[in-house]
Image (cartoon, helix red, strand yellow):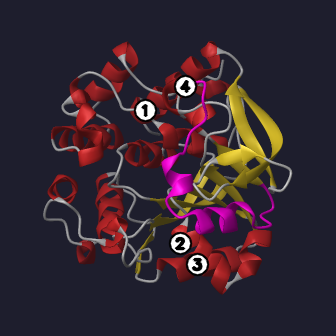
Amino acid sequence: MIPASDVPATPTPIPVILDTDIGGDIDDTWALGLLLRSPELDLKLALGEFGRGTYRASLLARFLTAAGRTDIPVGVGIEVPGHPSGVEPDTSEATLLGDYQLDSYAGTVHRDGVQALIDLIMASPTPITVICIASPINLAEALRRQPEIARKARFVGMFGSVRLGYAGNKEPCVEANACAFVDCTRAVLGAPWQNTLITPLDTCGLVRLDGEAYRTVHASADPVAREIIGDYRTWSAHPPGWAKGHKDEAATRSTVLFDTVAVYLAFSHAGMKLESLPIAVTDKGMTVIDPSGPTLSVATEWNDPSAIQAFEKLLVERLTRPQS
């Protein structure tokens, strides 16, 4: 079991950068909330990923403002010409942003978020952990500009499918973050980070809140929980085309909270089985065990069903407990 009180305390918070495609699936929003409520982590930069740079940076800025964390800089990610991620938000996504304008953010906005990431890592006296919960276009560009960032940082990502697919399916499958830009995925997973750790669908694809756990977050007066549920209601009422099956689901349960597991792994491995595996990325974006691939630390299993329940309990506690 891993209730909040049992997660080992970190004397000095771990400096982290979050690279996120917030505004697509709603689990990025839950992950940001967990990160803000994890005292083990110190968020140095929230960077929008996978195109739509100003839109994603605006969503990050709006959430951080609501959470009272305008001390955290926001970065605008690079655009993706000729790819759907690079077009303007569709109506369903635009409803999340409302009339919020990035220029109104009281904190720092880095218009070149990739350079901000590079500068942070290169200047940091201690290794920064990069948490990537999106197709890693920004990170591939950062490595192109300054390859030395890998040797000065750790990497935790939500990527791939090793032995299980979506919803615990026994057949591995193509996973969205890994397959969208295969060359970027290969470059980032193959970079010489101090440590490279991924949570594939095998572990992150099994986390979902329902029943009393979800009702606790749904009813919470905590500002972070309120912002998550408010955004989830909006997203669920007007889901992107690929997520029509989640329409109006916010009343009863969460979606699968893939990205929260990557945030958790940035500060704890309790309840998880980690394996050192050579992982190659195929031309179709499959992440397969293959001696030709770089050796990664892979969270391949939860120790048992109670470990998943314990993580979900931790998530609920952190999003709803009174903050000191």
Confirm whether the magenta stretch covers residue 186: yes
- The residue tagged 2 is 138
Mark linked to residue 213: none
Of residues 180 and 223, the one drawn nearer to the viewer in this rendering: 180
Mark linked to residue 141: 3
Distance (Cα) linking label 2 and label 1: 25 Å
Q: Residue at x 56, y 39 (%)?
A: 173
Residue type for callout 2: Asn
Distance (Cα) linking label 3 and label 1: 29 Å
Residue type for callout 1: Val
Dots 2, 1 in contact, CB < 8 A:
no
Within 10 Å of disc 2 (Cα), the crowding (few <14, some 14-19, many 20+) is many
Dots 2, 3 in contact, CB < 8 A:
yes
Of residues 308 and 315, the one drawn nearer to the viewer in this rendering: 308
Of residues 70 and 81, the one drawn nearer to the viewer in this rendering: 81
Distance (Cα) linking label 4 and label 1: 14 Å
Element marked by disc 1:
loop
Element marked by disc 4:
loop
Distance (Cα) linking label 4 and label 3: 33 Å
Q: Residue at x 76, y 79 (%)?
A: 148
Element marked by disc 3:
helix
- The residue tagged 1 is 256
| Residue 110: percent from left, percent from top | 43, 80
| Residue 216: percent from left, percent from top | 34, 21
Dots 4, 2 in contact, CB < 8 A:
no
Name the N-terminal-most of marks 4 and 2: 2
Q: Residue at x 80, y 48 (%)?
A: 290
Distance (Cα) linking label 2 and label 3: 5 Å
Magenta segment boundaries in residue numbering: 170-195
